[in-house]
Amino acid sequence: MLFLSLFAGILLLFLGRRFFWLFVALVGFLAGFSAAGNFFNFNNPLLELLLGVGFGIVGALLALFLQHFAVLIFGFVAGWYCTQSLLLMFGLGNMHNLWLPALIGGIIAMILLSVTFEYALIILSAVIGAYAIVDTDIFPAQYQVIIFAVLVIIGVLFQFKDLTHKPRPVKAKHRKSSH
């Protein structure tokens, strides 16, 4: 499971904006995987993986066929997951008392994603990708917040650079007509 979270985090960190359907699928996977372990207490890695994959498939299908609906739903899910993850990382609560801040974070992210799609997608995917990488516990606990912040900055800068470096159309040369 460590490899899957690390791989999903890297993809979100660097490619979240470029491949919206991938962003939605990976957020669905991470949210489903997290919900299976934290809310449903499955304590079974296979069931956690299956729920994560199921959420991911539903998310990808929504993103491909119902993009506007997917933006709203997964904007909310991404905001919920992001808010909850950040509060847990900073030690500001536990899984059972974070529902109200996570609900507010979900609503804010849903609105931001529907209004400023490109920029909100870059920031949300970088934050969720960085958290997925740091949450693997491969980094010492005392450095996780610093590594998280550095990863978010790298991911946002990389995706903004990709956004601003679109190829320019080639201008056609004007011919003088001889009338």
Image (cartoon, rainbow, N blue to C red):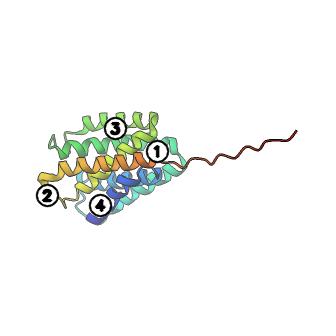
Q: Position of residue 78 (x, y in %)?
A: 35, 44
- Assess whether mark 3 and mark 1 are in contact (beta carbons under 8 angstroms): no
Residue under numbered circle 2 = 140
Mark 4 or mark 2: whose residue is earlier in sequence? 4
Q: Secondary structure at mark 4?
A: helix
Disc 2 marks a residue whose amino acid type is Pro
Disc 1 or disc 3, which is closer to the eye? 1
Q: Secondary structure at mark 1?
A: helix
Mark 2 or mark 3: whose residue is earlier in sequence? 3
Disc 4 marks a residue whose amino acid type is Leu
- Assess whether mark 4 and mark 3 are in contact (beta carbons under 8 angstroms): no
- Assess whether mark 1 and mark 4 are in contact (beta carbons under 8 angstroms): no
Seen from the viewer's position, the closer of residues 63 and 158 is 158
Q: Does residue 71 appear left or right of residue 102 in this picture?
A: right
Residue under numbered circle 3 = 106
Q: Which residue extends farthest right?
A: 179
Residue drawn at x 54%, y 50% is 167
Q: Secondary structure at mark 2?
A: loop
Task: Give me the C-alpha separation between circle 2 and circle 3.
Answer: 29 Å
Q: Position of residue 54 (x, y in %)?
A: 40, 58
Residue under numbered circle 4 = 6
Disc 4 or disc 1, which is closer to the eye? 1
Seen from the viewer's position, the closer of residues 57 and 145 is 145
Mark 4 or mark 1: whose residue is earlier in sequence? 4
